[in-house]
Image: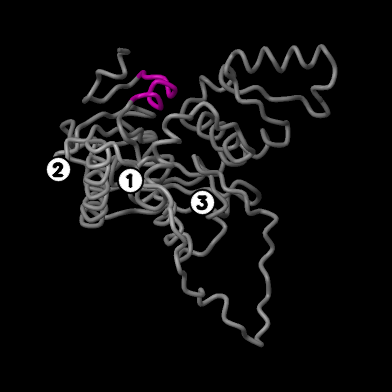
Amino acid sequence: MTTTEIITSGIHYDMPFADYLNHPGYGNSDLREFRHGLPAMMKWKREHRDENGDTEATRIGKSAHCAILTPELFEAQVAVKPEGMTFQSKANKEIKAQWEAEGRTIISAAEYQQIEAVRSAFFAKAAAAESFAAAEGKEVTVFWTCPVTGVRRKCRPDWFTDEWTYDLKVSVEATKDLRTLTYMAQKNGWLNQGAGCRAGLNANGYSIKGARLVVIAPKPPQGLRVWLLQLSTDDCDHLEMENENTCEGIAVAERTNFWPSTPDQFVEIELPMSATWTEEVYETEDTDDAEDFPL
């Protein structure tokens, strides 16, 4: 049994992200998958974490987080591929293999410029920069036991103060209007994540009153598309009740070892409203920037 398997509580300031992922506690992504997807898929994803490869979205997200939250680790965790470099030659293939062996995220020179713009946009927003400067912990790992269900839980707030927990998102959702962004933040599980981080910190002795989100667009002009969102105490309480309800379902699945998947029989469906014929012509939205940077 590893160290991470036996830790059930506490705030840990130096735990590697890989150890956090491998801990058997349930994090926000697990709860979101169980709630909105298939319980069987949540179980499968937990058992196959290493098979999920990097995409442009995860590369930008992870690298931007590192550049903002732990800049002293950027060089060790990120490898910037020089402009024009390919991995066709034997020498460059060996360089790539070395970077991968070191566990570094490989990004292009153009992606590095994006990350620099995201970092500058973050610190140009005074409220975001001030909250970060006042942080009591950055990228800490939090473990606790759900008081309602006994399910082991975990979270990893990007930073927190004595009043607020914070999460940074580099996402195309920042290009939307506030109403759409709020809807997508709820759909993507970001709001439940903030409520969960608050619950985890409070379970370990803090009195966090609410959750905050900093959402930054991945592409120019990043500085004009930085959203600062805040969840009240009451809203966090409501969302945490939803998290606890999800944990009840997880507890049952663990106890019975039954993780529902798709039905075994054909299911009759209703035609979606969006499929209704209309003569009205709608202008289609340009989706060139439709990548999501979810970390």
Does residue 222 appear left or right of residue 71 in this picture?
right
Three-letter amino acid code of the residue under disc 2: Val
| Residue at the image position 57 percent from the left and 18 percent from the top | 103
User: Dot 1 lies on which element?
Assistant: helix
Residue 21 part of the magenta segment: yes
| Residue at the image position 51 percent from the left and 20 percent from the top | 72
Indicate which label's residue lies in the foreground, 1 or 2.
2
Residue 261: percent from left, percent from top: 41, 47
Residue 130: percent from left, percent from top: 39, 40
User: Dot 2 lies on which element?
Assistant: loop
Provide the residue designation for mark 2: 148
Provide the residue designation for mark 1: 194
Mark 2 vs mark 3: which is more N-terminal?
2
Q: How many marks?
A: 3
Residue 227: percent from left, percent from top: 47, 53
Where does the magenta region start and end? Answer: 14-23
Provide the residue designation for mark 3: 226
Mark 3 vs mark 1: which is more N-terminal?
1
User: Dot 3 lies on which element?
Assistant: strand
Q: CA distance from mark 3 to mark 1?
A: 18 Å
Three-letter amino acid code of the residue under disc 3: Val
Q: Nearer the viewer, residue 151 or 84?
A: 151
Tags 2 and 3 touching, CB below 8 Å: no
Q: Quadrant of residue 275?
A: bottom right
Q: CA distance from mark 2 to mark 3?
A: 36 Å
